[in-house]
Image: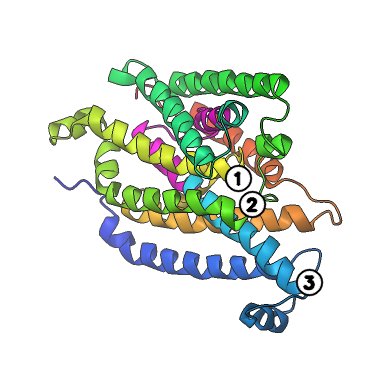
């Protein structure tokens, strides 16, 4: 039995073209992110500054101490969250699933704040605690719908409840331990202004590992997207695979949250946009979501720091403005499409 969509061979060429175009646009967006800002650089000045080995001028400091970490942070955060959303939508068989909506981001954020309040600082503390919280939240949502006893809509509602609980926990920690996390306001909204190469190093390695695992799991995700009964009939251990895929999604989302804060809706917007163009084959959707997600966050961060100069908006705030109407649109579309939320 062919586990890929009937149109796979027909859309294969389009998918490769889209991947190549996404890679080119990602490189352009990274260049724009490093050249543009409160002190814009021309292309020639950018290349000249880039080639310096020990520059001490202001443009060198701006490029390597501020803009490069932000661009790389946007790349890894966008890729991780977008692919995490892609995995969760396939595992939960639900188009509304994304890390911020079902509580994955909030679980990671809660554990980050808890660890910051109770444990001594460590290079790996934020990444490990964020992964633990993201995995715990994901597993609770997954077990809520185990055995197909919960419809898709109620599965998302369970995630919303979990998100609320963890958010209340974060606010409680910040009240009891005001100094639990430096820049907690920016963390709760989501932003890249405090990202440095040092804070990015460990999460970046974990996100690269998660992306590799996600690509390796793409065939199984395609099989799982056919439905639980069909996957079981083809020999898949559904519960085992779901737990594995959710763990990969937790690595990606938790690592992104550990340095970028609670950025929302990337895991909802990007996978839907990619699937609309190239279809639902995860062998192409996962790499395309990684490229497009990185580009999307980099461009949103660029807009958030240039639209209202000399003021700067956290990128998570802009994401909320973009993502909330899209989430409402998906709910409205689901209500019009009979049976969308019936069954898992």
For the residue pair 65 and 311, the one nearer the viewer reads as 65
Labels 1 & 2 near each other (Cβ < 8 A): yes
Quick check: 87 above or below 281? above
Mark 3 or mark 2: whose residue is earlier in sequence: 3
Residue visible at 17% across and 48% down in the picture: 2
Q: Secondary structure at mark 3?
A: helix
The location of residue 87, given as percent across then percent down, is: 38, 41
| Dot 3 or dot 1, earlier in sequence | 3
**Disc on the earlier residue, 1 or 2:** 2
> Which residue is nearer to you in this view: 98 or 227?
98
Q: Residue furthest front?
A: 120
What is the distance, in whole Å, between disc 1 and disc 2 at their CAs?
A: 7 Å
Classified by dominant secondary structure, the portion drawn in magenta counts as helix
Q: CA distance from mark 3 to mark 2?
A: 19 Å
What residue is pinned by disc 1?
Answer: 260
The circle drawn on residue 195 is 2
User: On the picture, is 148 further left or further right than 114?
Assistant: left
Nearest the viewer among 120 and 290 is: 120
Q: Is residue 96 visible?
A: no
- Rendered position, 160 above or below 325: above
Number of the label disc, if any, that sits on residue 202: none
The vertical placement of 195 against 247, above or below, is below
List x then y, in percent, for residue 198. 57, 54
Q: Is residue 90 magenta?
A: yes
Can residue 215 be found in the magenta stretch? no
Residue 53 horizontal/vertical position (percent): 62, 79
- Density class for disc 3 (Cα within 10 Å; few <14, some 14-19, many ≥20) is few
Percent across and percent down for residue 165 are: 57, 18
Q: Which residues are magenta?
A: 82-111
Per the image, the residue denoted by label 3 is: 58
- Residue under the point 57% across and 22% down: 166
């Amino acid at each position: 039995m062919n586990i890929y969509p009937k149109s796979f061979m027909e859309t294969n060429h389009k998918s490769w073209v889209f991947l190549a175009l996404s890679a080119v646009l990602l490189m352009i967006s990274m260049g724009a992110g490093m050249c543009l800002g409160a002190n814009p650089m021309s292309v020639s000045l950018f290349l000249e500054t880039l080639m310096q080995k020990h520059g001490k001028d202001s443009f060198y400091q701006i490029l390597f101490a501020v803009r490069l970490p932000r661009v790389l942070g946007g790349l890894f955060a966008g890729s991780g969250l977008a692919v995490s959303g892609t995995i969760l939508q396939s595992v939960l068989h639900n188009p509304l699933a994304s890390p911020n909506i079902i509580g994955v981001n909030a679980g990671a954020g809660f554990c980050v704040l808890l660890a910051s309040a109770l444990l001594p600082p460590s290079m790996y503390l934020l990444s490990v605690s964020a992964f633990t919280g993201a995995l715990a939240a994901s597993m609770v949502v997954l077990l809520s719908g185990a055995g197909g006893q919960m419809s898709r809509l109620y599965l998302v509602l369970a995630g919303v409840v979990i998100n609320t609980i963890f958010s209340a926990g974060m606010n409680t920690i910040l009240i009891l331990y005001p100094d639990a996390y430096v820049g907690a306001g920016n963390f709760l909204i989501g932003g890249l202004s405090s990202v440095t190469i040092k804070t990015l190093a460990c999460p970046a390695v974990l996100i690269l590992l998660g992306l590799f695992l996600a690509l390796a799991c793409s065939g199984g995700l395609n099989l799982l997207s056919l439905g639980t009964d069909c996957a079981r009939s083809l020999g898949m251990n559904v519960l085992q695979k779901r737990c594995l895929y959710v763990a990969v999604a937790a690595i990606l989302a938790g690592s992104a949250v550990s340095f970028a804060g609670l950025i929302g809706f990337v895991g909802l917007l990007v996978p839907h946009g990619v699937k609309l163009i190239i279809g639902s084959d995860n062998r192409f959707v996962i790499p395309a979501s990684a490229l497009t997600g990185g580009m999307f966050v980099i461009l949103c961060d660029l807009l958030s720091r240039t639209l209202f100069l000399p003021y700067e908006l956290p990128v998570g705030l802009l994401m909320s403005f973009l993502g909330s109407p899209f989430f409402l649109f998906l709910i409205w579309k689901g209500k019009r499409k009979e049976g969308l939320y019936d069954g898992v």
